[in-house]
Image (spheres, helix red, strand yellow):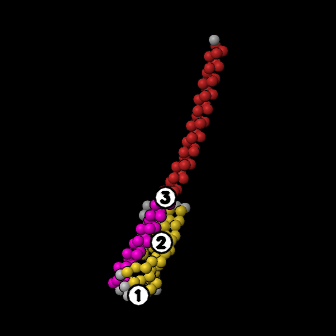
Amino acid sequence: MKKKRQSRAGFVLVTVTFLIAVVGLEIFILADSSNTVLFQSDRILLEAVEENLAASGLVWAKVNIGKGGIAAGQETTLEMPEEDGRQRELKVTVVSINQGHAQVLVYTSCRHGRQHLEHSAAYDIEF
């Protein structure tokens, strides 16, 4: 009877040890997956910030060209305060102005941690 009880206790100990190892492996896999999701969500956020910067640059250009406050060939760097650790940069260059139409080059740059997005595009606007 005593031998059967020791055998049963050994089986329970091995089972518990195995379950602890399985739970540890699952936690490791979930932690790695959460890092991937965090990286991807930060990238999506940077892309949204970059789109907002480009839209802000276009509105700024439209208003200032309409007022006559900016000339063709002029590059302007707009100040963007750092927000939540994200560094942002916005440059607007007016390429040409012709009778109510202008061609504008907008350069955006966003950085957060190790991720860095840069984008430059030309736009035609009416003012």
Are there few (<14), some (14-19), or many (20+) residues within 10 Å of tag 2? many
Q: Residue at x 56, y 48 (%)?
A: 32
Whole-percent x, y for residue 34 in the image: 52, 49
- Whether residue 64 is visible, yes or no, is no
Q: Which mark is residue 98?
A: 1
For label 2, the residue is 108
- Give the residue at mark 3: 42
Residue at point 54% right, 46% down?
Answer: 31
The stretch of residues the image draws in magenta is: 42-67
Residue 26 in which image quadrant = top right
Q: CA distance from mark 1 to mark 3?
A: 40 Å
Instruction: Name the secondary structure under disc 2.
Output: strand
Placement of 52 over or under 99, stated as above or below: above
Q: Which residue type carries mark 1? A: Asn
Q: Residue at x 63, y 11 (%)?
A: 1
Q: Verify CB contact (< 8 Å) between mark 1 and mark 3.
A: no
Vertical placement of 25 versus 6: above or below? below
Would you say residue 64 sits in the magenta stretch?
yes
Task: Tell me the distance, in whole angstroms, between the alpha carbons under discs 2 and 1.
Answer: 25 Å
Give the mark, 1 or 3, whose residue is nearer the N terminus. Answer: 3
